[in-house]
Image (spheres, grey):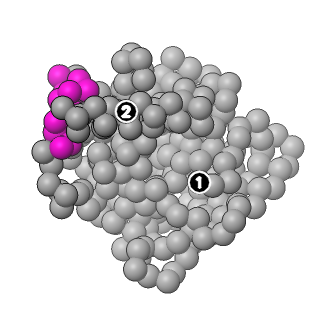
Amino acid sequence: SACATRRSGRTATSMARIRRVYVCAVALSSAAALAPEIHRRQALSSGAAAALAAAAPAWAVDASAAIAVERSGFSPTIKQTGRMSRYEDTILGPRGSKSTVNIAFDYPSTWTAFKNSVDVIDGNTGTVATVVAAPAGDLDSKAFYNCIFSPDGKIQRAGTPVDEFKVLSVRDGVLPGYKEVALKFTAVSPNSRLIDRRAVATATRIGDTAYIFIVSAAAVKWKDEQDRVTAAARTFTAS
């Protein structure tokens, strides 16, 4: 249909943009059901996806989705100290409020931070870091972190489908009031290849909102990337 054709064109453009910005790194996204693990191989054909999207009513939005945070200033403050850099920024609080939230995290200086969004990328390995926000639930529950993979969340809207995902564990973070989350998922690349990825996230709650810093890497590189991914994730703070 014409609708499907237009949607297909938009999706292709979105995927091309993601590949340029993230150097083919595959980020997090998901299917609709809030379950510990989701399988969607049969639902990922472009025709079926377009038909489902066209049939969905405008009000059918997942209010629990982990969405992109909005920066309140022109550019973040980045301080480089040897092999590490410190990212500091102020983001807008919940929609409808006038509050702001200060966020910060460390990352290897070889990674690239983008000024227009809270995203960091290692162009050599495809390791990606990003910050999302979601209505706060039980941060001790694995089920809560399904919000990261919502089709209405930041990553899904960027145009990268996920074939399946699983929240592996949730434990107390390094700092009081923070949780450390282990994740794995299989993403679908623009050329329809299945790519396994692993991730570590740090989450905290401010009022009724949870702020989640997610760092993910390709599973085939996990042995080499795990320490850097985990170390970066553990530096995240929001206040």
User: Secondary structure under badge 1?
Assistant: loop
Q: Earlier in the sequence, mark 1 or mark 2?
A: 2
Range drawn in magenta: 42-54
Which residue is denoted by mark 1 in the rendering? Answer: 117
Question: Is residue 48 found inside the magenta-colored segment of the image?
Answer: yes
Q: Horizontal and vertical percent for residue 114? A: 66, 48
Left/right placement of residue 164 relative to residue 128 reads left
Residue found at x 43% / y 60%: 133
Residue found at x 66% / y 69%: 73
Look at the image and tell me in which quarter the N terminus lies.
top left
- Confirm whether residue 211 shows in the render: yes
- Confirm whether residue 169 shows in the render: no
Left/right placement of residue 61 relative to residue 191 reads left
In the displayed structure, 154 sits above or below 175; it is above
Q: Horizontal and vertical percent for residue 21? A: 60, 37
Which residue type carries mark 1? Ser
Q: Horizontal and vertical percent for residue 176? A: 52, 64
In the displayed structure, 68 sits above or below 43; it is below
| 3 and 118: which is toward the camera | 3
Residue found at x 56% / y 20%: 221
Badge 2: few (under 14), some or many (20 or more) residues near its Cα, within 10 Å? few
In the displayed structure, 16 sits above or below 94; it is above
Which residue is denoted by mark 2 in the rendering? Answer: 9
Residue found at x 33% / y 66%: 135
